[in-house]
Image (cartoon, grey):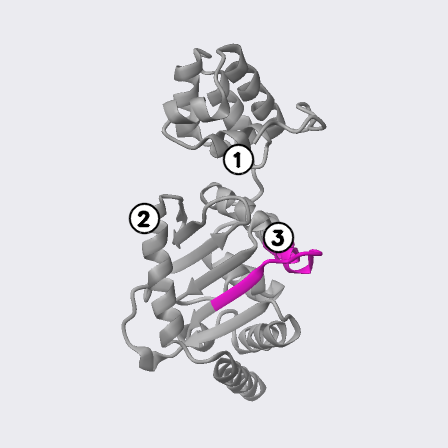
Amino acid sequence: MPLPKDLDPYANPRAFYGAELRRLREAVGLSQNGLGERAFCSGTYIGLFEAAERRPQEEISRALDGLLGSGEHLQRLCRLARTSKVAGYFADAAELQQRAVSIAEYSSMVVPGLLQTESYARALTRAAHPYASDNVIDNHVRTRMERGLLLDSPTPPVLWVIVHEAALRVPVGGATVIAEQLDHLHSQAVARPRVVVQVLPYSAGATPLLHSAVTLMHFSDAPPAAYTEAAYSGQLVEDSGLVEQISSAYDLARASALSPEASLSLIKSAAKGHASDAHLS
């Protein structure tokens, strides 16, 4: 994929990285495929960097500097291009979500970020950062809410979400906050035809993803990718074999989950239960 002629290399650090990579590649007489072969990746992958459609990676930037004889030039540009408002370990996945035609998420304990309410996101963020200032918490929550705008884009991805029943029961933020969150989860699945929600019930027992948080992303112009997350850390997975293994595990979880209709009924029932608790407190 060549660098688009109307891409301004000075528009942002990522565009400058792409322009410099292309300049260096052409200076040594290599095609995108030729450089990709030497860097043990595809020519398409090199093209995505040059077109500023993918955030550059530190490891491959180091390899490219070695292949192109550019010292640490691309590595320094990479550090500039990787600045992000979201946590560093999630930044690549957050960007890929913007390009995905479909997103499949599984969460064992919480409602996934794209479907969170502000109050629920704030409660989760405060729990994860108990000593942070209010300003820091506000910035985290604002960023998470901005991510949710993806569903309002002209061509939103198909979003398929599986949440474990435990996510419906844990009163994150208290009874009022979780009731509001579950009502929102229900309404999003009802109002948005491209959003599907399933609940994996306690009765399903052990499944391959039981203790996981997983996101699978499919694209129209690139191989699928996955993202796995734990507390304060996450990993983007692009190895085709591992992505396929995660995808198979997700399919098993989907088969064990309640139907979308039964899931919505359980979500509504749980929301009413929490609302009742809030009324009594």
Sequence-first disc among 3 and 2: 3
Q: What element carries label 2?
A: helix
Bounds of the magenta span?
A: 144-161
Q: Is mark 3 on a helix, strand or loop?
A: helix
On the image, the x and y values in percent for residue 183 come to 59, 77
**Residue shown at 32%/49% (left/top)?**
242
Question: Label 2 sits on what residue type?
Answer: Gly
Identify the residue position indicated by label 1 in the image. 55
**Residue shown at 44%/77% (left/top)?**
169
On the image, the x and y values in percent for residue 190 come to 62, 77
Question: Label 3 sits on what residue type?
Answer: Asp
Q: In this view, does 266 lie above or below 160?
A: below
Identify the residue position indicated by label 2 in the image. 241
- Name the foreground residue: 214 vs 51: 51
**Residue shown at 67%/56% (left/top)?**
155
Q: Which mark is residue 138?
A: 3
Quarter of image, res 205: bottom left
33 relative position to 195: left or right: left
Do tag 2 and tag 1 residues touch (Cβ < 8 Å)?
no
Q: Which of marks 3 and 1 is in front?
A: 1
Q: Does the magenta stretch include residue 152?
A: yes
Q: Residues within 10 Å of mark 2 (few under 14, many from 20)?
A: few
